[in-house]
Each structure stands twice: as C-alpha cells, then as structure tokens.
Amino acid sequence: MPKIKSHSGAKKRVRRTGSGRLALKRSRRNHLLQQKNARQKRLSRTLIVHTRDRRALTSLLPYL
C-alpha cells in the first residue's frame, strides 16, 4: 500500500501541540505591527483548531 501524500500548504501552517491538539498561526501578525492596534494584534495569536475542523485537517495531514 503506498503512502498518502500530505498537503504541502497545510503542513507548513499546522502543528500539533503537546497535548495532541492542532494549532495554527492566524494572519496579520508578520509586519507593520507598529501601526496596528492592540486588539488587532491580540486577536491574531495562535489558534487551537476547532474539533469540527479537525477531521478535515487530519485528512490533509495523515501523518501529523
């Protein structure tokens, strides 16, 4: 049986936490942070993936 290929875009964006959940980094946190307000920066922190979206991501990343 051949190996299943992982989605190359998803494996660059999603990681597994120590407790086994999936986490990803939200957008708008890379540059021009000086002119963004604190609320916008606070809402762009690391996000734990919801359980409903977990099944879709595990099909994209079978070995994660």
Image: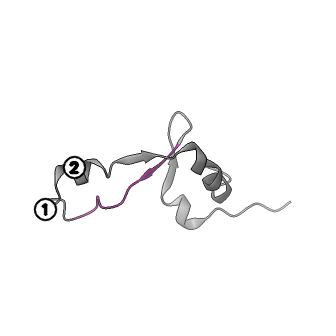
Residue mark closest to the camera, 2 vs 1: 2
Depth order, front residue of 41/5? 41
Stretch of the chain drawn in magenta: 22-31
The majority secondary structure of the magenta stretch comes to: loop
- The residue identified by callout 2 is 39
Depth order, front residue of 41/31? 41
Q: CA distance from mark 2 to mark 1?
A: 12 Å
**Disc 1, SS:** loop
In the displayed structure, 20 sits above or below 63; it is above
- The residue identified by callout 1 is 35
Quadrant of the rendered image containing residue 56: bottom right
| Residue type, mark 1 in image | Gln
Q: Residue drawn at (24%, 54%), measured in percent from left and top? A: 40
Image location (x, y in percent) of residue 20? 56, 37
Q: Residue drawn at (59%, 47%), measured in percent from left and top? A: 52
Image location (x, y in percent) of residue 47? 42, 47
The image quadrant where one finds the N terminus is bottom right
Q: How is the image coloured?
A: one colour
Quadrant of the rendered image containing residue 31: bottom left
Magenta stretch: includes residue 26: yes
Residue furthest out toward the right: 1
Which of the labelled discs sits on residue 8, or is there none? none
| Residue type, mark 2 in image | Arg
Name the side, left or right, on which 3 lies relative to 14: right
The local crowd at label 1, few if under 14, some if 14 to 19, many if 20 or more residues have their Cα within 10 Å, is: few
**Disc 2, SS:** helix
In the displayed structure, 44 sits above or below 35; it is above
Image location (x, y in percent) of residue 22? 53, 45
Depth order, front residue of 50/31? 50
Image location (x, y in percent) of residue 25? 40, 53
